[in-house]
Image: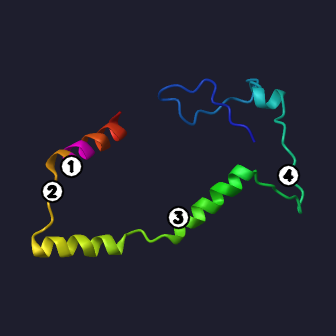
Amino acid sequence: MTVDFNGIGRGQVNTQKTPTEKPQTTRTEQQPAEQTPAPARGENVRLSSQAESLKQVEQQLADLPEVDDARIEQIKAALADGSYKIDAEKLAQKMLDMDNSIFG
C-alpha cells in the first residue's frame, strides 16, 4: 500500500482526485523494495572473545552489592563519635572533576 502525499499543502487535507486525473507513480511503485530473507531457524550466533569477556565482567558487577555496607557502618561510627573529618579541598576537587566529566 502506498500513500501519495504529492499536492498536499496547507488546507488540502483529505482532498480527493477526480477519476479523470492520472495518479502519479511514486518511487516505491516503480522500484519494489528489496526484502531481506528471514533468518532460518536453528542458526547459531558466536560471540567474539571480547564480547564474552564483557559478559563475564557484567555478571561479576551484577553480583557485587550496590552499596558497601562496611564503609557505611565505618562512616556512621565516625560521625557518631565525632572523628569524621571532611577535607574541603578534596571535596571541592571531586565536585569539579564530576562537573568536568558531565559538562566537559
Report the amino acid beneath label 1: Leu
Name the mark on residue 15.
none
Residue position marked by numbered label 1 in the rendering: 91
Rounded to the nearest angstrom, the CA distance separating label 1 from label 3 is 27 Å
Q: Residue at x 14, y 71 (%)?
A: 79
Label 3 crowd bin: few (<14), some (14–19), many (20+), radius 10 Å = few
Q: Is residue 32 above or below residue 81?
A: above
Q: Which mark is residue 38?
A: 4
Q: Earlier in the sequence, mark 2 or mark 4?
A: 4
Q: Earlier in the sequence, mark 1 or mark 2?
A: 2
Tell me what residue is drawn at x 76 percent, y 24 percent.
22
Q: Which residues are magenta?
A: 90-95
Could you tell which of marks 4 and 1 lies nearer the N-terminus?
Answer: 4
Label 2 sits on what residue type? Ile
In front: label 3 or label 2: 2
Disc 1 + disc 2, Cβ < 8 Å: yes
Residue designated by label 3: 61
| Residue at the (85%, 52%) spot, across then down | 38
Labelled pair 2, 4 in contact (Cβ < 8 Å): no
Q: Contact, CB < 8 Å: mark 3 with mark 2? A: no
For disc 2, the marked residue is 86
Tag count = 4
State the CA–CA distance, disc 4 to disc 1.
56 Å
Q: Is residue 62 left or right of residue 53?
A: left
Which one is in front in this view, the residue at disc 1 or the one at disc 3? Answer: 1
| Main secondary-structure element of the magenta-colored stretch | helix
